[in-house]
Amino acid sequence: MDTQSLNLRLSEEHEALRRSVREFAKRKITPVAAHFDETGDFPMEIVKEMGKMGLMGIEIPEAYGGAGMDTVAYVLAMEEIAKADAATSTILSVNNSLFCHAIYRFGTETQKQKYLRDVATGEKIGAYSLTEPMSGSDAGNMKSRAVLSSDGTHYVINGRKSWVTSGPVADYVVLFTMTAPEHGHSGITAFLIETDKPGFAPGKKEPKLGIRASATSELIFDDYCCPVENVLGEVGKGFKIAMTVLDAGRIGIASQALGIAEAAYEASVEYCRTREAFGAPIGTFQMLQAKIADMKTRIEASRLLIYNAALAKESAKGTGGRYTTEASMAKLFASETAMFCAHQAVQIHGGMGYSKEMPVERYFRDAKITEIYEGTSEIQRLVIARNELGLR
């Protein structure tokens, strides 16, 4: 066993970060979370404030505008923001895990200087675009195309992408599309897209069940010209980049799920203490005590899996190693824990749990997506099993 996986004690710096983010979330996000959920408006001012705190590029070195902290810091920030509002934490996750991490890991120095700083500081918004209407888990089935121009200076991109978080407001997008469709997964290439150029347009905005303020839409490419210097990594290596980046993303979503689960749990504990029935607080009823016990146990188990995945990612830095199994286990268990805890919270609150007067119905709606995006629970189980069995 890797002994580093047992080193789960938080440093003073991590504890200070947790307190700072928790105070910010309670003061700035919690009071307006229901409003943004209702309207679906993008919380741009909150995003900019998170940028000023260093939260939009937590693991990016200060030389590129980030906070220069580690994965554990990122996990803690995601957890605290998600407890206040899952939609805001989704924006934070995409910016950190899927956009900034992708460019820092695979970008050239020129690309880092041009695209990383403004996103890491929250001045601009980044997005990640892999999914298409006919290719979700099956990325090799994507229909979008990038064709190299006759003079070799740029690619012409055409196609439609779907379910792009921050798509309607993104300034830059990490795009995955086919450059050699006859090669399947090996024909996918990653590109850095500037959304203010001709040939790009956001499409339909999705009317979602939960995380409504995170702004999810289609992206439409119509003869979009992307210079060859905006290829991220190597031509034909896009699928490997996408999967490597999703390892980091899954740790972020696991942390988001933990935050949702904790919010649902804390609301339930408070309700059990204060709500009375049959002449006593409902927390004295053994069936509700069992729910509280199960929620708490799953939350703490999720936390350990997430911290273990974060430490595995830290160990992989500089070596090019992967932490796929650890990230998938954390994401699988934490997302199902979020759904379990949110469901139990609604049940504990009874009729009030079904009312928008209480936040638990929002936790329930927000929790579901954690079992779906960045790899469904079914995909996580396949990933874990295939890695354990040595299958590729």
Image (spheres, rainbow, N blue to C red):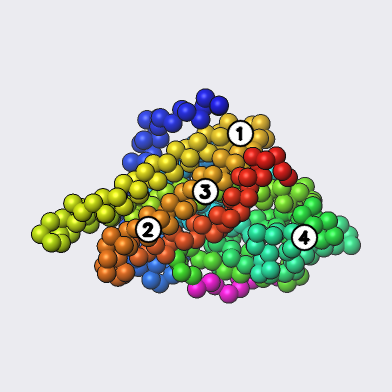
Secondary structure of residue under mark 4: strand
- Which amino acid lies under the numbered mark 2 shown in the image of this protein? Ala
> In this rendering, is residue 312 above or below 214?
above
Which of the 4 image quadrants contains residue 157?
bottom right
| Quadrant including the C terminus | top right
According to the picture, the residue beneath numbered tag 4 turns out to be: 178
- Seen from the viewer's position, the closer of residues 255 and 213 is 255
Secondary structure of residue under mark 1: loop
Secondary structure of residue under mark 3: helix
User: Which label belongs to residue 331?
Assistant: 3
The crowding category of the residue bearing disc 3, from other C-alpha atoms within 10 Å (few below 14, some 14 to 19, many at least 20), is many
Secondary structure of residue under mark 2: helix
Per the rendered image, the range of residues in magenta is 197-207
- Which amino acid lies under the numbered mark 3 shown in the image of this protein? Lys
According to the picture, the residue beneath numbered tag 2 turns out to be: 342
Q: Earlier in the sequence, mark 3 or mark 2?
A: 3
Q: What is the C-alpha distance between the residues marked 3 and 1?
A: 20 Å
**Residue at horizontal 31 percent and vertical 46 percent from the top:** 293
Q: Are marks 4 and 3 in contact (CB under 8 Å)?
A: no
- Which amino acid lies under the numbered mark 4 shown in the image of this protein? Met
Q: What is the C-alpha distance between the residues marked 1 and 4?
A: 29 Å
According to the picture, the residue beneath numbered tag 1 turns out to be: 317
Place of residue 74 in the rendered image (x, y in percent of width and height, measured from the top left)? 47, 42
